[in-house]
Amino acid sequence: MKKLVVLILTVTLSLALPTFAFGQGVLRVATEAGFMPFEYVGETGQLLGFDMDLIRAIGQVLGLEVKIDNISWDGLIPALLNNNYDAVIAGVTITPERQNSVDFSDPYFESVLTIVTKQGAASLASLDSLTGKAAAVQISTTGDFTASDLYDEGKLKSVSRFDTVADAMQAVIIGVADVVIVDLPVAQAYLDANPHAPLIAAGAVAANEYYGIAVNKNNQELLEQINSALIELEENGTYAEIYNKWFGAAAPQTN
């Protein structure tokens, strides 16, 4: 299914306690916990998901306490640039536009977009099949960017933007929108968690995309430490364990 994509480093990076200014050995992390199974709020208020387990494992490798705040999606990058946080992990796709503002770790997850629509609706197997449709998206995601492009091309009738994926899905359920454009693993997690929702996902409809951990461009030491930790987690099997926990199959090794 999906796999870890790690760029092989040609130098050995120290995993000693980082010297960047985190305070007293604390890695301050921001997320937006409305992107199951990557990040979501559990029944007792705890932050759960693939990304949450991964960043905590990175913290263990680096000898840092990881403190994670759940904030709005569109506030993640501004908060990082304002140095309120050291890193952002929230299923953030690496894009050239985002790379103008922040640096990304080596990719840690490969994903792809899908179309979600009501069961029984006309088959929608590609982005080209969305002509005349009203789309719902989570704001400032790649689903949003793709929908915006389709709207500008005159294909989509309208684009409604929501703070969370769940809100976008609800828009289709109640008939406010025809489709949701969203990452396939997120769509599948929503459908698994809501088996009675009258929705269906179309499968992959776009080129693959890659998630990265965002850091401030002024924090190259942290970037190197995170990349080194990702390699260690893959080599020692921890990444595969986390992947299997959330996706039900061991992640392929990239040797």
Image (cartoon, helix red, strand yellow):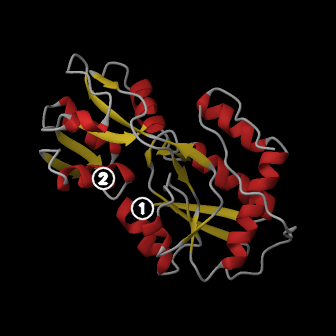
Q: Are marks 1 and 2 in contact (CB under 8 Å)?
A: no
Instruction: Tell me: 225 left or right of 214.
Output: right
Q: Position of residue 56 (x, y in %)?
A: 68, 54
Q: Position of residue 78 (x, y in %)?
A: 42, 74
The residue that label 1 is drawn on is 71
Front residue (pair 112, 239): 112
Residue drawn where x is 45% and y is 74% of the image: 79
Q: Secondary structure at mark 2?
A: helix
Residue drawn where x is 30% and y is 38% of the image: 127
Q: Secondary structure at mark 1?
A: loop
Instruction: Tell me: 240 left or right of 89.
Output: right
Amino acid at the residue labelled 1 = Ile
Instruction: Tell me: 170 left or right of 90.
Output: left
Q: Position of residue 136 (x, y in %)?
A: 23, 44
State the image quarter where residue 176 is shown. top left
Amino acid at the residue labelled 2 = Asp
Q: Is residue 229 above or below residue 5?
A: below
Residue drawn where x is 66% and y is 59% of the image: 106
Kindly report which numbered mark, 1 or 2, lies closer to the viewer in this rendering. 2
Q: CA distance from mark 1 to mark 2?
A: 19 Å
Which label number is shown at residue 144?
2
Q: Earlier in the sequence, mark 1 or mark 2?
A: 1
Q: Is residue 46 above or below residue 115?
A: below
Q: Is residue 167 above or below residue 102?
A: above
State whether residue 22 appears in this view: no
